Image (cartoon, rainbow, N blue to C red):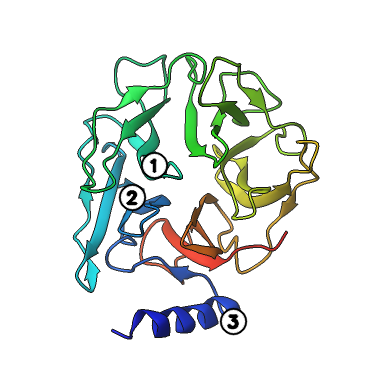
Amino acid sequence: MPPPAVAAIVLAGLLASGPPVPLLPGVVDSPDTEVRPAFSPDGRCVLWGSIGAPKTPWRILQTCRDGAGWSRPEAVSFDGPDNDFDPAFSPDGRTVYFFSNRPGGQGGDDLYAVDRNPATGAFGTPRNLGPRFNTPGDEWAPSPTADGRLIFSSDGHGGLGKQDLFEGELAGDAPVRGLGPEVNGPLDDFDATFLADGRTLVFSSGDLKAETRVTLNSARRGDDGRFGPRKVLAAPINCSEAINNGPAVDPRRPGVLFYSAYCPALGPGRMDIFEAPAPTP
């Protein structure tokens, strides 16, 4: 294995000149479906959603650095017998947000948070984010921001289409609000994250039920808080003709965008996680 500095230079060259690169082949990317990685701010661990055979629960897996390599992926301690998916770290690494259809929620898929000890990596007991965020419908892909907000999608808060993107302050009791018609349209708008600039939102849009051309898009937020027009991201992103989703960023590698897609010529599974150069604003 080359030294980290050399490996970073080689990888940067690959990303700049070629197709998307699978994330940790043989560790993260596998014959199963992998979606939406979450990177701990200290760079020690990666979480992601995994879907195995049909009718098996959706799981959240984790790998952590083990010497020069990575540990064998295992389900996180808070992963239960129901569907758990879409993990995301808070900026300080002390909380992981995710969605679950476990009993005791508001209905459908709900948003949850679980405390994490950054020193030991141990997780606490998940807590439901309550009716301000959750509805009898489905809430997905929570994405915490550096200024204390949570971006997520829902089909239960009203909106302009099926799944729409919303944001709400994690502290206080203000109602959540939609991201507006520049982001939300008549189909499914979901799986969003801000790039390192804190203004450029990358999100998935399309018809999930039909599984035809769900693409990654971007929209930039202006000083007035409103988003400019969306645009479909150019190659090498959006390698799949079916579904491209689960965008994510690693705070230690701000120039890279991670996403999930079915691109069988590039990865080993039904959907794999890829990395490509982050789009420029």
Element on which disc 3 rests: helix
Of the two numbered discs 2 and 3 on the same chain, state the one appearing first in sequence: 3
Work out whether 60 lies above or below 99: below
Work out whether 224 lies above or below 274: above
Q: Are marks 2 and 1 in contact (CB under 8 Å)?
A: yes
Q: Amino acid at mark 2?
A: Leu
Element on which disc 1 rests: strand
Q: In 3D space, how far apart are the residues under numbered discs 3 and 1 (Cα atoms)?
A: 30 Å
* Foreground tag (3 vs 1): 1
Of the two numbered discs 2 and 1 on the same chain, state the one appearing first in sequence: 2
Residue holding disc 1:
87
Q: Amino acid at mark 3?
A: Ser
Residue holding disc 2:
47
Residue 105 relative to residue 219: left or right:
left
Q: Residues within 10 Å of mark 2 (few under 14, many from 20)?
A: many
Q: Position of residue 75 (x, y in %)?
A: 22, 45
Of the two numbered discs 3 and 1 on the same chain, state the one appearing first in sequence: 3
Residue holding disc 3:
17
